[in-house]
Image (spheres, rainbow, N blue to C red):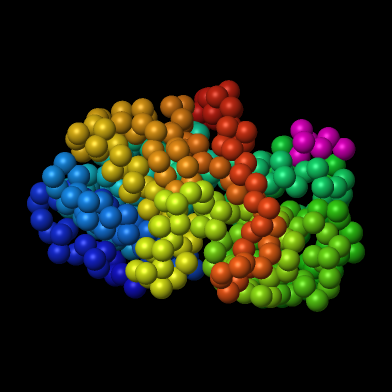
């Protein structure tokens, strides 16, 4: 694991050269999100390796400098400021957690450094806390909840919810309910379950949900909480009687393996098995060869951030912040998820949300998503009026 002041291992030597273009990455290498974060770093490193192998940018190599924020917002502030003021990084990539993402974005705003977020997806970042140097390649929590309502909304009349008792989960349910009222006006929520984060025993929540007999269960559990819930709920037959929709990460699929029930509606941000075209296939091959693993969504989005910067630097013929912001705003970038632009209003990338049903994979030792639907960004992102109202309220 990288230490608090460590460099990305493949780029340590290059990062010392004054002529390098430097990417700063303050992220959460310590704590419950460590495996997700390691995937992000892997994807960023692979992208930089490819850029440098092709001759670099503007005749210069690209270097990566990594700092561990340990899921602590104050460290996110300190490390990001150090990367900008002492290490003289040219651009930033965001961390894993939204809490640290808020502080990284604030420092980027202060020093007018471009930052691309690849994991933090609190709607506050592109809405009320937006600034011109902020860009994001991850669907916001608002967009994800709306996408799930679009897909799951028509599947019944009686809805139930389970999610950790924290802010993002409460927001997710709020956004889901708002969109559900439009997609299926006759639908109603008949029960809600709010276990604490890290809950070891879901028995009482499972029996409560099962006895309510919902048509649809919307889940905002993730990571170890989702894995524990699925393992404990499976013997009760909950997934046989109810259409279940949940956010899924690659780690969840790998952790459950063949224990993952078939037919769960999973939502993912950038599943490698649903990426279009030969470019994505070649990326997976290179990732597998370098890391002996399958690329998680976080790896793909980290790689895409490097490629977006590379495209913008080529277009601008500069790493000067104002020129890069203009190039990012004006450009269209060929990324793994498809051709991508940043919306002028909030610099939200027009990336889709992927929703499909869990099923056995042909070539992998874990379940994947089948019948994947790409819900386009322009169907689920907030309207201009919603964005401006949020900024006005702030």
Camera-nearest residue between 349 and 54: 54
**Is residue 81 found left or right of 173 in the rendered image?**
left
Q: Residue 381 at x, y = what percent?
A: 58, 34
Which residues fall within the magenta stretch?
180-186
Q: Residue 92 at x, y = what percent?
A: 30, 47
Q: Is residue 348 above or below residue 6?
A: above
Q: Where, by quadrant of the figure, is residue 70 drawn?
A: bottom left
Q: Residue at x 65, y 43 (%)?
A: 147
**Is residue 245 found left or right of 54 in the rendered image?**
right
Q: Residue at x 48, y 49 (%)?
A: 277
Magenta segment: does it hold 182?
A: yes
**Is residue 245 found left or right of 23 in the rendered image?**
right
Magenta segment: does it hold 105?
A: no
In this view, which residue lies farthest toward the front? 278
Q: Residue at x 68, y 46 (%)?
A: 148
Q: Where, by quadrant of the figure, is residue 79 drawn?
A: bottom left
Q: Residue 299 at x, y = what percent?
A: 42, 58
Residue 182 visible in the picture: yes
Q: Residue at x 37, y 47 (%)?
A: 305
Q: Is residue 12 above or below residue 325?
A: below
Q: Residue 245 at x, y = what percent?
A: 72, 55
Q: Is residue 160 above or below residue 13?
A: above
Which quadrant does the N terminus fall into?
bottom left
Residue 121 visible in the picture: no
């Amino acid at each position: 694991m990288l230490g608090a002041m460590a460099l990305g291992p493949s780029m340590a030597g290059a990062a010392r050269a004054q002529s390098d273009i430097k990417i700063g990455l303050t992220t959460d290498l310590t704590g419950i999100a460590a495996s997700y974060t390691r995937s992000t770093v892997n994807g960023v490193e692979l992208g930089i390796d490819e850029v440098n192998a092709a001759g670099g940018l503007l005749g210069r190599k690209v270097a990566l400098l990594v700092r561990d924020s340990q899921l602590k917002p104050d460290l996110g502030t300190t490390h990001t400021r150090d990367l900008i003021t002492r290490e003289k990084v040219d651009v930033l990539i965001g961390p894993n957690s939204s809490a640290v993402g808020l502080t990284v974005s604030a420092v980027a705003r202060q020093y007018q450094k471009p930052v691309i977020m690849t994991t933090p997806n609190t709607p506050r970042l592109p809405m009320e806390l937006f600034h011109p140097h902020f860009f994001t390649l991850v669907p916001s929590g608002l967009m994800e909840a709306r996408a799930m309502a679009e897909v799951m909304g028509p599947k019944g009349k009686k809805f139930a919810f389970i999610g950790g008792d924290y802010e993002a989960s409460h927001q997710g349910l709020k956004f889901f309910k708002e969109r559900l009222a439009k997609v299926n006006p006759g639908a109603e929520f008949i029960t809600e379950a709010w276990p604490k984060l890290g809950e070891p025993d879901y028995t009482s929540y499972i029996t409560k949900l099962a006895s309510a007999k919902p048509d649809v269960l919307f889940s905002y559990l993730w990571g170890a909480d989702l894995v524990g819930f699925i393992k404990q709920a499976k013997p009760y037959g909950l997934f046989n009687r109810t259409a279940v929709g949940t956010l899924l990460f690659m780690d969840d699929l790998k952790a459950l393996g063949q224990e993952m029930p078939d037919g769960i509606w999973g939502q993912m941000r950038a599943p490698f098995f649903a990426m279009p075209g030969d470019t994505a296939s070649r990326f997976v091959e290179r990732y597998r060869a370098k890391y002996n693993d399958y690329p998680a969504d976080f790896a793909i989005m980290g790689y895409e951030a490097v490629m977006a910067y590379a495209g913008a630097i080529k277009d601008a013929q500069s790493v000067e912040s104002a020129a890069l912001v203009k190039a990012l705003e004006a450009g269209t970038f060929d990324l793994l998820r498809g051709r991508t632009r940043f919306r002028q209003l909030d610099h939200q990338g027009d990336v889709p949300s992927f929703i499909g049903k869990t099923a056995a994979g042909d070539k992998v030792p874990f379940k994947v998503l089948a019948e994947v639907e790409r819900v386009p960004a322009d169907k689920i992102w907030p309207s201009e009026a919603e964005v401006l109202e949020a900024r006005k309220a702030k």
